[in-house]
Image (tube, helix red, strand yellow):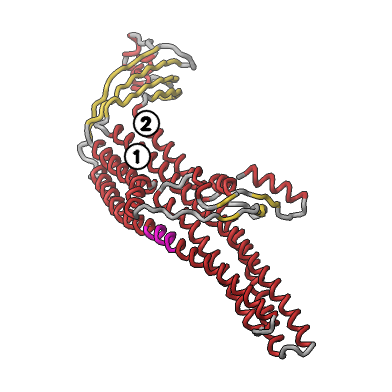
Amino acid sequence: MKPLGMALGIVLGLTGGQAIARSFTLSQAVDFAIVHNSMARMAQAKRGAARAEFKLAGDQDVPQASVSYGYLFSNNPLEALSAELERRQVSAAAFTPSTLNHPGVTKLGTTTLSLSWPVYSGGAIDADLRAGRYARQAARSAALRARQAIMAQVIQSYEGVLVARQGLAVAQKAVTAARRHARTARYLYSRGRIVRSDALTASVNLGASEDMLAQARGNVRIALDNLSAAMGAPAALAIEVPDATLKVVPVPDQDVARFYQRALAHRPDLAALRAEAAAARAQAQAARDRSSFQVHLMAQTQWFSETPGLRHNAWTVGAVISKSLYDGHRNRDQADVLEERAAELDAQLAGLRARIHDEVLRAYETMRIAMRRYRIANANVARARQAVAVTQVRYGEGRTILLDLLNAEHGLVQAREARLAALYSLVANRAALAEACGTLKRRMLSTLGVAS
């Protein structure tokens, strides 16, 4: 996003702030959105955070090494005697009362190298690793679901542009016909062959057609804005869509129950919730295990001298076994909180399954209804076109009035608009059904109803 924004900024500076136009096929629009849509960026960031947390959990059982250097000045008798012992410089004179009581100022530099290794944590480290693994799976599934949602949004917005553009073509044809009729009506009225009301009716029809054309142009602009928003395009980038047509996609002949079972098996958000619940239970187990026995191996070596240096070495190796006897019930309470969180996620899973059933059923039934509507509208277009042709002949022969011809053409326009609406519903719900089933993938773009 940053290189694109920087490039656009440079170009805008050279072009006086005018938007840069770029044409996108459907595949290019989807690829652009997967990178630049804010939902996709958020999902990727969460996925990166989950990977980092898993790595952090794995680092708990890694040996830790540290090095330090300290220098002290003290007239404390115990510090003075300790310094003599650590430097291996104790003599009989150091144990006289005068020396012990008044040792003077002791100077001691200490270099320490330490190694610590947690070899047993009562299962807490393993449980944290399981929790991190589940969280990573949940983030991966959530990112896939976000990708599918973005793809469906871009597909439907892209199809919306194509439908709006075809609606504009219908409106332009209507205006062309209305202007022709208005000119003819004015001519016939000037010759006294029709009454004034017919000429006024033709003018009103022209105004209505021009209003429809203005709305159609606005619909194209709105559709392009919707596509730009779905793609996450910056304001400086003007989206263009090449000429393409919408194909009539086949309606699935499978029972809706099979689509629902497919959704239960493939929906990434279901997998994400299940993984989150498992992560919460693993974290609860880790909290309980922290109250169990803990075993650490440790090793330490030190060097002591009045001036910085590695002299007079001493080392220590050992093991520490510990167990929390009382912590104010913090670990137990934290485990209870996490168990309740897992129960909440289980309830969300049940709700999500019901919502998925509704989404699958709605997309499936809407697609089937759209196909029936398309067939009816397509037949109506053919009938309306024939009605216009017959009425034009009758009007030319003087056997009908202008109003009948205008009504016939208005019916044709309505039939074309109804067919476009049904076609959009058909192809848009094809993508919605694939998204509801969790099977929407990039390779499916060529089968979703856009002919490039």
Name the residue tied to disc 2: 58
Q: How far apart are marks 2 and 1 (CA)?
A: 13 Å
Q: Tag 1: residue type?
A: Tyr
Position in image of residue 107 (x %, y %): 44, 20
Q: Is the magenta stretch mostly helix, strand or loop?
A: helix
Q: Residue at x 59, y 55 (%)?
A: 245
Quadrant of the rendering where the N terminus is positioned: top right
Q: Residue at x 32, y 17 (%)?
A: 316
Position of 319 with respect to 178 (left or right) is left
In front: 325, or 193?
193
Q: Is residue 367 magenta?
A: yes
Q: Which mark is residue 134?
A: 1
In front: 302, or 288?
288
Residue closest to the far top: 92
Q: Which residue is drawn at 48% across and 43% down?
A: 45
- Give the magenta part as a residue range: 361-369
Position in image of residue 205 (x %, y %): 66, 80
Q: Residue at x 27, y 30 (%)?
A: 121
Q: Tag 2: residue type?
A: Gly
In front: 173, or 263?
173
Q: Does the magenta stretch include residue 215?
A: no
How crowded is the residue under tag 2: few (<14 C-alpha within 10 Å), some, or many (20+)? some
Query: In this rendering, is residue 166 above or below 435?
Result: below
Tell me the quarter of the picture where residue 176 sits.
bottom right
Query: In this rendering, is residue 326 above or below 380?
Result: above
How crowded is the residue under tag 1: few (<14 C-alpha within 10 Å), some, or many (20+)? many
Position in image of residue 448 (x %, y %): 50, 51
Q: Between tags 2 and 1, which lies in front? A: 1
